[in-house]
Image (cartoon, rainbow, N blue to C red):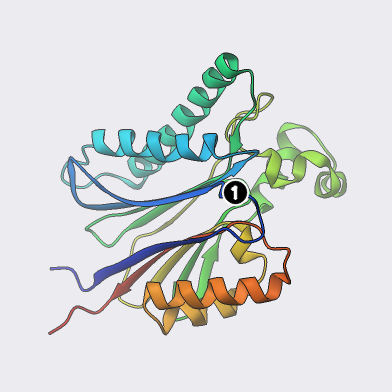
Amino acid sequence: MSSYKIEAGTAQHLGNRPQQNDRVALMTGARAPGYVLAVLSDGIAGAAASEQVLHTARQVFDEFKPGDRPSIERLQQLLREIVAETHLVIHMNAFTTKTQAQASFVGLVLTPHGEAVWAHVGDSRLYHFQDGKCLARTSDAAYVEHLVSSDRLPPDAAKNHRKSKLLLNVLGNSRKDPFITFGQRTDLAAGAVFLLCSDGLWHFFTDAELGAATARATPRQAAEMLIGKAGERSQGKGGNCTMAIVKLVKPAL
């Protein structure tokens, strides 16, 4: 029996933008009992690409058959398939519609065996907290290193190079395939929190603030508080604000 139960929720706010381009969802797999997939995507120049992220994620996850206990590499491959298939479909749609669509991607898989695997592309983020302390979060560090090695850019130049900006590491980029970074945890316990969010949220908070807010409240309460505070701090210039909060809590006796 699991030593924790899952409490989760999603939330969005338009911010000071004319439309909502972010998309977020929590999913269970049709052929994977006990598995949960959280996905968040920030669409660029519209919501077409972020909509496609969620659509493809549902299709791929519904086809996922984990067996007795899939390896971490198999779970990473599941997330890689979502990114690759979405990227391909966005390209195909671009030829048909003659319009460019791009999006970020954050995906988190939780297993019934106390494991978590996540993947990320772009400027949306995933945070992993334990009892309010930030143990991990996605960043652009690996992408900058990738540019240095693959594009042979000097390290100092890569940090200031236009390609080092995560907005260009996206699904739908016609010049480059998405660069995916992965993370994992294999010893999950009650007190763990995962936060997936768009830049309309994380831009206005420190890691410590996000950890404290999500640790001491339910996902719904934390989301309401964070959205309200982000609106205050943006001073009328905030973007779309979207998040998914997944908490592992002790089961009731």
Residue visible at 69% across and 46% down? 166
Q: Is residue 156 left or right of residue 239?
A: right
Please rate how many residues cluster around mark 1, counting C-alpha atoms within 10 Å: few if below 14, some from 14 to 19, many from 20: few
- Image quarter (top left, top right, bottom left or bottom right) of the C terminus: bottom left
Residue 248 in sight in this render: yes
> In the figure, residue 104 lies in which quadrant?
top right
| x, y percent for residue 188 | 33, 68
Where is residue 121 drawn, in percent x and y? 57, 44
Q: Is residue 146 above or below residue 223?
A: above
Tell me what residue is drawn at x 67 percent, y 65 percent. 203
Residue extending farthest to the top is 96
The residue located at (70%, 39%) in the rendering is 168
Amino acid type, mark 1: Gln
Vertical arrangement, residue 247 with respect to residue 110, above or below? below
Q: Name the residue beneath numbered marker 1.
A: 19
Query: Residue 158: x percent and y percent?
Result: 81, 44
Q: Position of residue 87 (x, y in %)?
A: 52, 29
Residue 77 quadrant: top left
Question: Which residue: 82% across, 47% down?
Answer: 155
> Looking at the figure, which quarter contains the N terminus?
bottom left
